Image (spheres, rainbow, N blue to C red):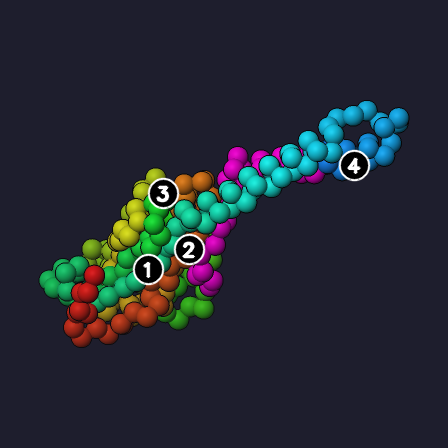
Amino acid sequence: MDTEQRVVRRSTPYSRALIAVAAVAFGLLIYAVIWSNRQDELPQLLDVQSATTAVLGATGAILARGQYARAVRPSIGWFGRVTADAAPAGRLAWICYALNGAQDSCTVSDVGYQVVLTGNSASDSGRWTRMEHAASVLEGRGLTSGSDFHLNLISPGLPITAGRRLYVGWFTEAAMTEVADVYVRLRVVDRVGDTHERVLALMRGAERRPTRPNIHLS
């Protein structure tokens, strides 16, 4: 599964509208050039100089929008470590966090889950589901939420500020024996209204038979 961050939706007012304005300006420029050679046959809409100014203005707005979008683009990543502070009775668990490494904040718009159980070549349903369904899939293997694993409820509208760690969930050795991977599709909206998507593969690099907690460096 592709886990690279990507843009899944551009903001209509700040993207498509600007492109439409630029297209109209280019159309007016072409018409103005044609009119300058056939003044007796066509009505004048804009002179060439005014049409050129409109094209330059629209193009500049598109470039400025793109530059600003890159500046406020979130950088969503994730990491995990072994801890003895999450599961009951001090049991060792693999705990996972998402992180916004950019300099600007973003807002969660949607969260989806896919669970791949051991012995299966595909996810339970082949589609993105809610957290509750993902938990029920794990419980179907005899695991207990809050004892063998835990998935955090991440609701739409939750802000992820710059540098903030977002707790996603934890899994004990018993859970990791039954689970090949857990994918979390995190969609966030940035300041300009673009929607970004990152799929977190929570079991990637996991210590499935932990013997001691990892050193906590952050």
- Comes first in the chain, label 2 or label 3: 3
Judged from this view, the residue extending furthest toward the right is 40
The span shown in magenta is 1-26
Q: Nearer the viewer, residue 182 or 14?
A: 14
**Residue 76, image x and y in percent?**
37, 55
Residue type highlighted by circle 4 = Val
Looking at the rendering, which quadrant does residue 15 occupy?
top right
Residue type highlighted by circle 2 = Arg
Instruction: Check if mark 2's residue and mark 1's residue have beta carbons within 8 Å.
Output: yes
Whether 28 is drawn above or below 64: the answer is above
Instruction: Check if mark 2's residue and mark 3's residue have beta carbons within 8 Å.
Output: no
Residue of label 1: 78
Give the CA separation, mark 2 to mark 1. Answer: 10 Å
Residue of label 4: 33
Residue displayed at 35% across by 46% down: 104
- Comes first in the chain, label 2 or label 1: 1
Residue type highlighted by circle 3 = Thr
Judged from this view, the residue extending furthest toward the left is 89
Residue type highlighted by circle 1 = Trp
Give the CA separation, mark 1 to mark 3. Answer: 16 Å
Give the foreground label among 4 and 1.
4
Residue of label 3: 107
**Residue 29, image x and y in percent?**
73, 36
Residue of label 2: 198
**Residue 28, image x and y in percent?**
72, 33
Q: Nearer the viewer, residue 154 or 10?
A: 10
Residue displayed at 68% across by 31% down: 50
Question: In this image, 180 relative to 66: left or right?
Answer: left
